[in-house]
Image: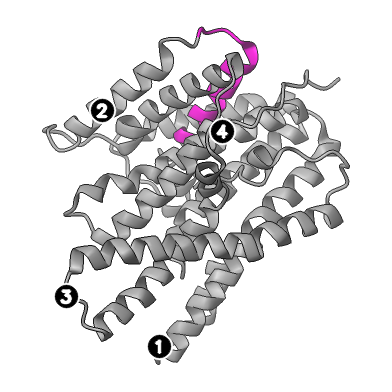
Amino acid sequence: MGIKEVPRINFETLQLLRGVAAILIVFFHAFGENSIFVYGVYGVDLFFVLSGFIIMYTHHSDIGLSNTLRDFLIKRLVRIFPTYWMVTFCYITLVTISGHALSVEYIVKSLLLLPQDTLPIVGVAWSLQFELLFYLIFSLLILNKKIFYPMFWMWGLASMSFLFLPIELPKVLKFIFSPFNLEFLLGCIIALVIIKNKLSYKWIAGMGISTIIISFFLQYKVFFEVHRVIFWGVPFSILILGLVKLEIRRRVHIPRVLTYFGDASYSIYLTHLISLLVLEDIAEMILVENLILAKFLICALSIMLGCIFYSLFERKYYYYLKSKLVSKKKFEPASQELNVELR
C-alpha cells in the first residue's frame, strides 16, 4: 500500500527564492568575493534545501512503490542532462576555439557528472554532482522502503558526523558523506513536518529571516571555522518551513514576472558563467569607463540570456521528452516538477 498523497500546491514563495538565489549567484561571480555580493555564493545552499524539500514533498507517496522508480529516474535525468550537455558543449567549443585542449577523460567525466579531482567543464556543475547523488539515494527509498529508509537517515547521520569530526576520508567517501548532503536532508525533514502538519506557521518564517540576518553578521566575526551548512543551510530551512506553512494556510500571490526567474533559474545558473565571460570581453573591447555600471549591465544581460535559453530550449525540450518517456499521464505542476532540481 502506498503512502497517502499530499496536496499539490504551487509554492510561489519558493519560486521567488529560487530566482533570487540564481540572480545573487550571477552577481557574486561578476563582482567577486570582495564585494557586497559575496553572500550570493550561498544561493547554492538554498537550492540544496529546496531540492530536498520538493523531492520529498512531491514523491513522498512513491516511497516503497518500486513501479514508480522508472518514471522518477527518467524525470530527474531528463530534467538535468539535456540543458547541462548543451551548455557544456558551448564551453568545449569556446575552449577549442581559444586553442586549448581538453582530455577525452575529462570531457566524459564532466558530461556524466562523475566526481573528479577538478571541477567539471562547467564549473558550477559541481552542485549537480551532489544533486545526482541525492536522487540516487532517494531512488532507493522508492525501490524498497523497509530496507533503505533506515539507511537513508544513517547516511545523514554519517554526513553530520564528518561535519564535526576532522577525519580525512578517501575522495569518494568524502563526496558521499559530504556535509552538503545534510542540506538535502534538511529539506526532506521540512517536507515531512509539512506533510504531518505538526507545527503552526505564524512564528517560523520570522525566525528564519532572523537567523539569516544573524548569519550575515556572524559570517566573518567568529574565531573558529563553521561550515556553511550550519551558517546558511539551517536558517534557509527554517525560512522555507515558514513560507510553505504560510502558503498552505493562506493564499500568497507573487507577481508572475518574479516567479518566472524561479522557473528560469536552472538555465540562468548554468549559462551565466559563459555569458559573463563573453560580455566582459566585449566590455573590455569597447573600453567601457564606468566599470561598476558595466558590471551591473553585464549581470542584467547575463540573466536575460539565461531566461531566453530557458524559454527557447529548456522548457520546450523538458515537456516534450517527459511526454514521450514518462508513463504517468498526470504530470506535476510546473513549479513542483519542472523546477524541482534546485541548485
If you read the primary sequence from the N terminus, does the residue marked by circle 1 or circle 2 appear first?
1
Q: Are marks 1 and 2 in contact (CB under 8 Å)?
A: no
Kindly report which numbered mark, 1 or 4, lies closer to the viewer in this rendering: 4
Task: Judge whether residue 234 can be spotted in this image.
Answer: yes
**In the structure shown, which secondary structural element does the residue marked by tag 1 occupy?**
loop
What is the magenta range? 182-200
Name the residue beneath numbered marker 3: 289
Q: Main secondary structure of the magenta part?
A: helix
**In the structure shown, which secondary structural element does the residue marked by tag 3 occupy?**
loop
Q: Position of residue 59 (x, y in %)?
A: 71, 32
Q: Which mark is residue 144?
A: none
Q: Position of residue 126 (x, y in %)?
A: 45, 56
User: Which amino acid lies under the numbered mark 3 shown in the image of this protein?
Assistant: Glu
Q: Position of residue 48 (x, y in %)?
A: 48, 40
Q: CA distance from mark 1 to mark 4?
A: 43 Å
Name the residue beneath numbered marker 4: 12
Q: Is residue 58 left or right of residue 218?
A: right
Name the residue beneath numbered marker 1: 100
Categorize mark 2 by other alpha carbons within 10 Å: few (<14), some (14-19), many (20+).
Answer: few
If you read the primary sequence from the N terminus, does the residue marked by circle 3 or circle 2 appear first?
2
Is residue 161 highlighted in magenta?
no
Q: Are marks 1 and 4 in contact (CB under 8 Å)?
A: no
Q: Which mark is residue 213?
A: 2
Q: CA distance from mark 1 to mark 2?
A: 44 Å
| Nearest to the observer: residue 271 or residue 343 | 271
